[in-house]
Image (cartoon, helix red, strand yellow):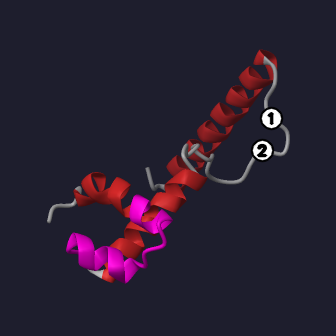
């Protein structure tokens, strides 16, 4: 049995499930274990609930998003100044 066995047997499993068969009965009929059938049905239901997964942004959201090009350029300039300040500090400390 390969990793993709579920693609072949899923329609049959769901059909038997609708008829009222238990996981054990389905497993016996198709030649799989009760646990395999149980996980297959659970995975199928989970995919039906959440068919499309959207990517969530990671990290803490900004308090106020940058909205204009001018604000964006100001933020870049501020970060460049901070970078220069830290670089000069490290040079003065003899670490660079």
- Can you name the residue that lies furthest to the right here? 64
- Residue 24 occupies quadrant: bottom left
Q: CA distance from mark 1 to mark 2?
A: 6 Å
Q: Are marks 1 and 2 in contact (CB under 8 Å)?
A: yes
Of residues 36 and 73, the one nearer the viewer is 36
The spot of residue 27 in percent (x, y) is 29, 76
Could you say where residue 77 lies in the image, as x and y percent from the top left? 70, 27
Q: Is residue 52 left or right of residue 65?
A: left
Q: Is residue 39 left or right of residue 53?
A: left
Give the label on residue 65, or none: 1
Residue that sits furthest to the front in the current view:
19
Say which residue label 2 marks. 62
Q: Secondary structure at mark 1?
A: loop
Decide: is 65 above or below 62: above
**In this rendering, position of residue 42 left or right of residue 65:** left
Residue under the point 43% across and 49% down: 96
Q: Quadrant of the N terminus?
A: bottom left
Our reading of the magenta stretch's main secondary structure is helix
* Magenta extent: 14-32
Query: What residue lies at 25% left-to-right and 53% top-to-bottom?
Result: 8
Q: Viewer-proximal residue, 90 or 66?
A: 66
The relative height of residue 25 versus residue 96 in the rendered view (above or below) is below
Which residue appears at 27% of the width and 80% of the height?
33
**Mark 1 residue crowding within 10 angstroms, few (<14) / some (14–19) / many (20+):** few
Q: Which structural element holds mark 2?
A: loop
The question of residue 58 being in magenta is answered with no
Residue 91: percent from left, percent from top: 51, 48
Residue drawn 71% across and 53% down?
A: 60
């Amino acid at each position: 049995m390969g990793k993709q066995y579920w693609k072949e047997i899923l329609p049959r499993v769901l059909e038997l499930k609708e008829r009222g068969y238990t996981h054990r009965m389905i497993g016996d009929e198709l030649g799989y274990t009760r646990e395999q059938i149980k996980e297959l049905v659970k995975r199928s239901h989970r995919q039906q609930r959440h068919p499309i997964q959207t990517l969530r942004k990671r990290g803490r959201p900004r308090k106020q998003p940058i909205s204009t090009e001018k604000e964006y350029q100001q933020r870049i300039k501020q970060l460049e100044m901070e970078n220069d300040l830290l670089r000069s500090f490290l040079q003065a400390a003899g670490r660079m």
